[in-house]
Image: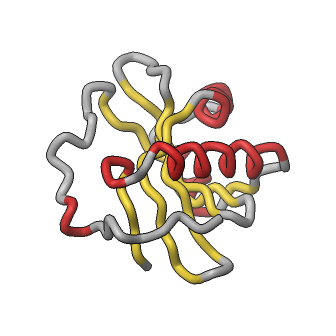
Amino acid sequence: MIKKHIKQMTKEEVEILTEKVKDIAENELVLSEHAIERIQQKNVDKRQLKKLINHFTVVEYKYYNPSYYRIVIRSRKHKKGENTCAVLDNEGNIITVWKNQENFKHSNVDLSKYNANLKVLV
């Protein structure tokens, strides 16, 4: 798996991924078993999940192979100082869900774990 952080993406790449998430979300999303467990552990309700899918920013693109990738998203709106985050795959699955503090903006992210040369292919 190779990944690219939003700080390394062009405006066009962010727009491509944003549109892809919207396309994926038009169909019925499937919660993985892990996502169901995380939703319960993190007290994420259906309303928060719906808001996340409708009002999000892209955080990461994770490329596995030409036919499989994942997109990490974060809610734009927060509840009680927290943003809801999730990982979606191109097959319409929500892989995992968690919450971050609203003020956590990835300012100290280690970009050496990412590949700025990765092309966003969707």
Q: Position of residue 3 (x, y in %)?
A: 40, 68
| Left or right, 76 with reference to 55 | left
For the question of whether residue 95 can be seen, the reply is yes
Tell me what residue is drawn at x 69 percent, y 55 percent.
31
Q: Quadrant of the C terminus?
A: bottom right
Q: Which of the 4 image quadrants contains residue 35?
A: bottom right
Q: Where is residue 18 in the image (x, y as percent from the top left)?
A: 60, 43
Q: Where is residue 2 in the image (x, y as percent from the top left)?
A: 40, 75
Tell me what residue is drawn at x 76 percent, y 48 percent.
23
Q: Which of the 4 image quadrants contains residue 99?
A: top left
Q: Position of residue 59 (x, y in %)?
A: 42, 47
Tell me what residue is drawn at x 61 percent, y 50 percent.
16
Residue farthest to the top?
80
Q: Is residue 61 above or below residue 42?
A: below
Q: Quadrant of the N terminus?
A: bottom left
Q: How many labels does the image show?
A: 0
| Left or right, 95 with reference to 25 | left
Q: In this view, does 2 lie above or below 60?
A: below
Q: Nearer the viewer, residue 16 or 30?
A: 16
Q: In this view, does 114 lie above or below 83?
A: below
Residue farthest to the right?
27
| Left or right, 49 with reference to 3 | right
Tell me what residue is drawn at x 82 percent, y 43 percent.
26
For the question of whether residue 41 can be seen, the reply is no
| Left or right, 70 with reference to 24 | left
Applied colour scheme: secondary structure
Q: Nearer the viewer, residue 100 or 22?
A: 22
